[in-house]
Image: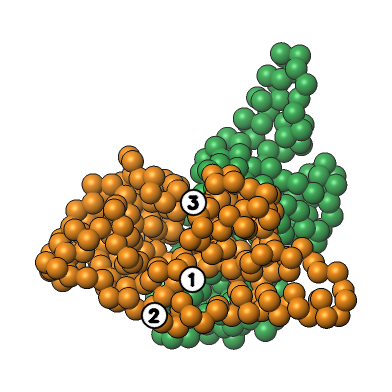
Chain colours: A green, B orange
């Protein structure tokens, strides 16, 4: 975990270098390079966020999630632990990754393709807004945990520091557009803006959205108000 | 099959009724209702088009595809017959639907989600433009058929009659945008225009694209130049 917090992300280094190169060459800095931070777009595969209570029901009393891979947002990680999700038609997804640290609610985030294959009719929701959403059963090595609600398709969203929000001229809860170039060419018209001093600029889309726009490393992306 | 050619599609009836209602009420007819034809958006699940030679290799000498369900484009149908697709890592998709009638080339159309699960690295191509694309093995009840190339992700596209092309001001090979409303909100920026006097106005997107934009019956859609 130490590396992730001390070594800057490749995108951050590239962003600084790009800006310096423009300045050295005495050329006007394009808008994307003027931004306080680089724009990272990450495709979130299906995953869940769990309470400590749920983790203990699934993995045993006193069990703590073990970080496997640091995520771009500070302190967030993919855990070694994964669970089996049992859907309404007894269909199953194995190895549903848990993202840590534990939260104060249980939430499963699926792409529509996952949801349809499991037999769920999931609504598009902002993270945390789970009232009235379908529930499911989770299975771990130490037992089951029933979620009465919390299965959603996460609304495509962008995490922002207040500096980024000032640069783009948006506030929390606004929607922005994100234009993805390349051979397919898709614009996401309702990208929910989430702002916190703890956030680094990062867009999260799900696997359906990532596949639909054919996102690859190097595909041009831009955020538009 | 008779129904499909003699009974107008629900969308066509609705389109006529909508226009008549505006006229009766003496209200200005909105642009979408002025269009010569209604806009249908259909999500194409993975499928293949085969030559008669391939059908005979897979289903036996002299075998003819049997129409199961008429598609919106005149004369096109989903066949009763389906095949098993064997990918590069020996992973398999069963029940890959064959669309008829037979063509003069063999082509498998997958969404990226399908392609990734099979281990294919498929390019985005217009239908028929298969040179240099990956191949695969197909298996049917009477034998195997090897496709040296032809596995693609179809470029999102719109079929148009020349009347529609005149209304939208586009020509064959142009790209249009399609804006999909609803809770997700996605604009497809590169919708390839295909024109033929035999075509009815219809957009084809794949399952990833349909899932990404959350397309449901009643979701508002519009074609933009």
Residue at 59 percent of width and 46 percent of height: B171
Q: Check the residue under mark 1 and report the chain it is in.
A: B
Give the label, 2 or 3, closer to the camera. 2
**Where residue A83 appears, x then y in whole percent?**
45, 72
Q: Residues within 10 Å of mark 1 (few under 14, many from 20)?
A: some
Between B134 and A52, the one lying in front of the other is: B134
Give the label, 1 or 3, closer to the camera. 1
Q: Check the residue under mark 3 and report the chain it is in.
A: B
**Where residue A60 appears, x then y in whole percent?**
46, 76
The residue at which mark 2 appears reads as B1
Q: Check the residue under mark 2 and report the chain it is in.
A: B
Do marks 1 and 2 both belong to one polypeptide chain?
yes
The residue at which mark 3 appears reads as B155
Sooner in the amino-acid sequence: mark 1 or mark 3: 1
The residue at which mark 1 appears reads as B72
Residue at 33 percent of width and 41 percent of height: B131
Measured in 3D between alpha carbons, the distance from the residue under mark 2 to the one under mark 3, in whole angstroms, is 28 Å
Residue A50: quarter of image: bottom right
Between B182 and A194, the one lying in front of the other is: B182
User: Left or right: B14 with respect to A48?
Assistant: right
Do marks 2 and 3 both belong to one polypeptide chain?
yes
User: Left or right: A153 with respect to B102?
Assistant: right
Measured in 3D between alpha carbons, the distance from the residue under mark 1 to the one under mark 3, in whole angstroms, is 19 Å
Give the label, 1 or 2, closer to the camera. 2
Residue B99: quarter of image: bottom left
């Amino acid at each position: 975990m130490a590396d992730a917090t001390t070594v800057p992300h490749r995108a951050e280094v590239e962003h600084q270098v790009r800006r310096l190169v423009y300045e050295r060459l005495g050329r006007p800095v394009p808008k994307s390079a003027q931004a306080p931070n680089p724009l990272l777009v990450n495709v979130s595969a299906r995953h869940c966020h769990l309470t400590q209570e749920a983790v203990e029901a699934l993995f045993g009393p006193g069990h703590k999630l073990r970080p496997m891979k640091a995520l771009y947002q500070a302190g967030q990680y993919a855990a070694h632990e994964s669970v089996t999700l049992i859907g309404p038609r007894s269909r199953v997804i194995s190895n549903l990754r848990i993202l840590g640290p534990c939260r104060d609610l249980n939430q499963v985030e699926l792409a529509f393709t996952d949801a349809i294959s499991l037999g769920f009719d999931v609504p598009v929701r902002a993270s945390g807004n789970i009232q009235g959403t379908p529930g499911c059963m989770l299975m771990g090595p130490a037992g089951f945990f029933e979620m009465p609600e919390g299965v959603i398709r996460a609304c495509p969203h962008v995490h922002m520091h207040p500096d980024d929000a000032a640069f783009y001229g948006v506030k929390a809860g606004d929607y922005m557009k994100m234009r993805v170039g390349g051979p397919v060419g898709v614009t996401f018209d309702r990208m929910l803006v989430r702002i916190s001093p703890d956030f680094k600029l990062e867009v999260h889309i799900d696997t359906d959205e990532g596949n639909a726009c054919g996102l690859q490393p190097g595909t041009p992306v831009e955020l538009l108000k």
